[in-house]
């Protein structure tokens, strides 16, 4: 009889499989990650998707100012999910695809439907054609962005990014709603519909253009800056708070035109487009994680 606490005798007939040694990683090969999805960045993407869906619902209820605000919130969340994924090292192929699908809803389908319900409906066939041009432009823009990841210069977008295009058309709704309350806009609904048509078509076509738009991805927030920069930031906040619809819409319009200004300047000086040049090594700050979506 075995003593108390002693291990039971080993069965000599039992066969044990030898432990298989782990295969060493090849040069440049990333270690395998556990299956599943990362919660934090994908939760932010889901919130952005919800805002886009909520904007559509509000437009169907004729609450276009609420729809515009929901789209702006989706823009804010869309700017956070990729950065959070890089900072927490939770990037994944799933998150990259999920982010693109969310962008298509929030900044592609939603703005097109909202603009149609707002005033493009009054133009009949021309109205829904303009909405389709915008929606198709957003889809092509996102597909081209995904195909060119790791190829183009990260400092510039090739074509107007879909969140900026959504800001351009939603900003028009916001400023018109605000100025109507102050009686500054007296245009007829028909004239306003054609203005909305021009903005919608411009945004849709510019998304698939080759105009370079600055991406702001090479700004290093960890780097020290002169004190005058902080004063400029404070003045910018004061300017925005003085009249948010007018100031923000003006900024959206300036950014929407900046790509063509850079394009004409490069054409005049004979410089190649940014994505045809070799991307500089300093495009991403050395102490920042590599750019990319989660």
Image: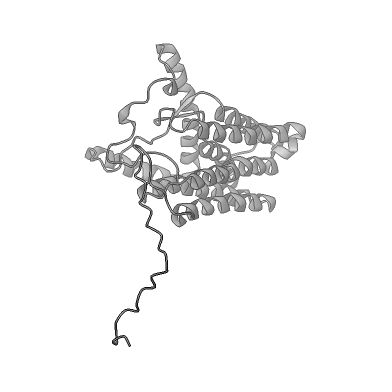
Q: Which residue shows up at 59% across the image and 29% down it?
A: 202
Measured as percent of width and height from the top left, residue 142 is found at 55, 35
Looking at the rendered image, the quarter that the N terminus falls into is: bottom left
Q: Nearer the viewer, residue 80 or 246?
A: 80
Residue located at (33% from left, 26% from top)? 280
**Quadrant in the picture for residue 235:** top left
Q: Nearer the viewer, residue 235 or 165?
A: 165
Where 73 sits versus 260, above or below? below
Residue 89 on image: x %, y %: 37, 49
Residue 149 lies, in percent from the top left, at: 46, 33
In this rendering, would 52 be left or right of 44?
A: right
Q: Is residue 119 above or below residue 140?
A: below
Relative to 7, residue 223 above or below: above
Q: Is residue 115 left or right of residue 39?
A: right
Report the coloring of the rendering.
Answer: one colour
Q: x, y percentage for residue 201?
A: 63, 30
């Amino acid at each position: 009889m075995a003593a108390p606490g002693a291990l039971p005798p080993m069965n000599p007939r039992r066969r044990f499989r030898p432990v298989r040694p782990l295969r060493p990683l090849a040069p440049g090969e990333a270690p395998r990650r556990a299956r599943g999805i990362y919660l934090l960045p994908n939760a932010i993407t889901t919130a952005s998707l919800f805002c886009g869906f909520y904007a559509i619902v509000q437009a169907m209820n004729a609450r276009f100012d609420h729809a515009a605000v929901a789209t702006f919130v989706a823009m804010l969340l869309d700017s956070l999910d990729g950065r959070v994924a890089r900072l927490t090292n939770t990037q994944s192929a799933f998150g990259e695809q999920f982010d693109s699908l969310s962008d298509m809803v929030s900044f592609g389908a939603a703005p097109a439907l909202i603009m149609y319900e707002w005033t493009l409906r009054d133009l009949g066939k021309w109205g829904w054609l303009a909405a389709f041009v915008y929606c198709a432009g957003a889809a092509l823009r996102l597909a081209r962005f995904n195909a060119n990841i790791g190829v183009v210069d990260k400092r510039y977008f090739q074509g107007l990014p879909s969140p900026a295009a959504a800001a351009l058309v939603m900003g028009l709704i916001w400023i018109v709603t605000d100025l109507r309350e102050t009686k500054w806009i007296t245009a007829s609904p028909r004239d306003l519909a054609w203005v909305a048509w021009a903005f919608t078509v411009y945004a849709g076509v510019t998304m698939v253009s080759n105009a370079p738009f600055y991406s702001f991805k090479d700004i290093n927030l960890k780097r020290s800056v002169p004190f005058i920069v902080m004063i400029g930031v404070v003045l910018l906040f004061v300017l925005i708070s003085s009249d948010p619809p007018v100031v923000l819409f003006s900024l959206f319009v300036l950014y929407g035109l900046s790509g063509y200004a850079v394009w004409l300047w490069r054409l005049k000086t004979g410089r190649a487009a940014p994505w045809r040049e070799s991307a500089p090594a300093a495009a991403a700050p050395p102490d920042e994680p590599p750019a990319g979506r989660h």
